[in-house]
């Protein structure tokens, strides 16, 4: 049985943890060859080892990438084309939510700049260097990770993060229009609150967790694999008429006015 991504080559950033880790494994299981990129060499290599053990040694390769550095992203695209001959899918997923991110008054400029550098510029570099490669492959699919906070305001301030994810949505929308006739689709993934280190390090007490869960109709945090399944759909040809979307995977959070008892 061919997989849903058989014959495709995918570049995934932030592949060492959370959503990127689950997407890397799922993509490889579905037949893709995966270039797993992360700033953290140890966790990125561990992802690749897991894929090798599960699927085989030719199914994944690790590249150390700081998405904020243009040359690192350019190199990752080059690795995809030299190792696997082409690039079809790019999942610009790496992102940070800094513990010192706060409201308009208290957020320091260096925290704002760092967040923008990784969450916004990192996605731009990913698109800038992937698009020529996707053109060479005859088209492809880009998925950029935004967040539900780009669509709803929160009373828990994380202003730089929220602003950065709004920028990812706007960037994704424009790119989707510009490249639509080149057979290049560009969609944004908008996860709700997910049980990954990024969020659990932030909601580090039971009280903070419950304060967030009140707003989720399903009454639980999402799992990284539930995001990975959505990304698989957006990456595959099954979503061939979908571009420019803010693809929400949020347990109903953005639909809720009042949640069940
Ligand atoms: P995570 O912290 O579990 O994983 C993020 C990965 O990105 C890590 O492996 C980290 O090493 C890597 N990374 C960080 N900075 C990098 C850089 N400069 N270059 C390359 N790699 C880098 O987080 P996650 O929850 O899986 O988040 C993935 C994406 O989903 C992020 O963009 C995040 O903002 C977004 N998101 C997460 C949630 C959530 O609730 N967890 C909700 C909405 C959106």
Image (spheres, helix red, strand yellow):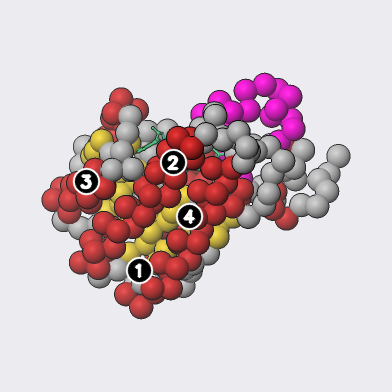
In three-dimensional space, the C-alpha distance between marks 4 and 2, rounded to whole angstroms, equals: 15 Å
**In the rendered picture of this protein, how many numbered marks are placed on residues?**
4
In three-dimensional space, the C-alpha distance between marks 1 and 4, rounded to whole angstroms, equals: 17 Å
Q: Residue at x 77, y 38 (%)?
A: 214
Q: Earlier in the sequence, mark 2 or mark 1?
A: 2
In three-dimensional space, the C-alpha distance between marks 2 and 1, rounded to whole angstroms, equals: 30 Å
Q: Are marks 1 and 3 in contact (CB under 8 Å)?
A: no
Give the quadrant of the N terminus: bottom left
Q: Is residue 111 left or right of residue 193?
A: left
Label 1: element kind: strand
In three-dimensional space, the C-alpha distance between marks 1 and 3, rounded to whole angstroms, equals: 23 Å
Figure quarter occupied by ligand 1? top left
| View extreme (top): residue | 205
Residue where numbered disc 1 is placed: 184
In three-dimensional space, the C-alpha distance between marks 2 and 3, rounded to whole angstroms, equals: 19 Å
Q: Earlier in the sequence, mark 1 or mark 4?
A: 4
Q: Is residue 83 left or right of residue 173?
A: left
The x, y position of residue 103, in whole percent, is 63, 38
Q: Residue at x 61, y 50 (%)?
A: 148
State the image quarter where residue 259 is shown: top right
Extent of the magenta region: 192-212
Residue where numbered disc 2 is placed: 113
Q: Residue at x 40, y 42 (%)?
A: 118
Residue where numbered disc 4 is placed: 168
Residue where numbered disc 3 is placed: 71
Is residue 142 placed above or below 208 in the rendered structure?
A: below
Q: Earlier in the sequence, mark 1 or mark 3?
A: 3
Task: Assess whether residue 126 is covered by the magenta stretch.
Answer: no
Is residue 154 placed above or below 50 in the rendered structure?
A: below
């Amino acid at each position: 049985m061919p997989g849903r991504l058989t014959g495709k080559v995918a570049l995934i950033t932030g592949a060492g943890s959370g959503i990127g880790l689950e997407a890397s494994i799922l993509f490889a299981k579905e037949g893709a060859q995966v270039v797993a990129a992360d700033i953290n060499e140890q966790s990125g290599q561990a992802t690749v080892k897991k894929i090798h053990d599960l699927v085989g040694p030719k199914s994944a390769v690790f590249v150390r990438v700081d998405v904020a550095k243009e040359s690192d992203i350019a190199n990752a695209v080059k690795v995809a084309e030299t190792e696997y001959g082409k690039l079809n899918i790019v999942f610009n997923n790496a992102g940070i939510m800094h513990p010192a991110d706060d409201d308009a008054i208290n957020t320091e400029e260096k925290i704002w700049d760092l967040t923008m550098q990784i969450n916004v510029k990192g996605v731009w570099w990913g698109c800038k260097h992937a698009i020529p490669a996707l053109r060479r492959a005859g088209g492809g699919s880009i998925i950029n990770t935004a967040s539900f906070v780009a669509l709803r305001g929160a009373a828990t301030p994380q202003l730089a993060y929220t602003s950065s994810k709004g920028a990812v949505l706007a960037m994704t929308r424009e790119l989707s229009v510009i490249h639509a006739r080149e057979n290049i689709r560009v969609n944004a993934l908008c996860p709700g609150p997910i049980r990954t280190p990024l969020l659990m390090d932030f909601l580090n007490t039971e009280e903070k967790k419950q304060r967030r869960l009140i707003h989720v109709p399903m009454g639980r945090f999402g799992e990284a694999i539930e995001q990975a399944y959505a990304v698989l759909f957006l990456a595959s040809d099954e979503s061939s008429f979908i571009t420019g979307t803010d693809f929400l995977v949020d347990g109903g959070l953005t639909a809720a006015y009042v949640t069940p008892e």
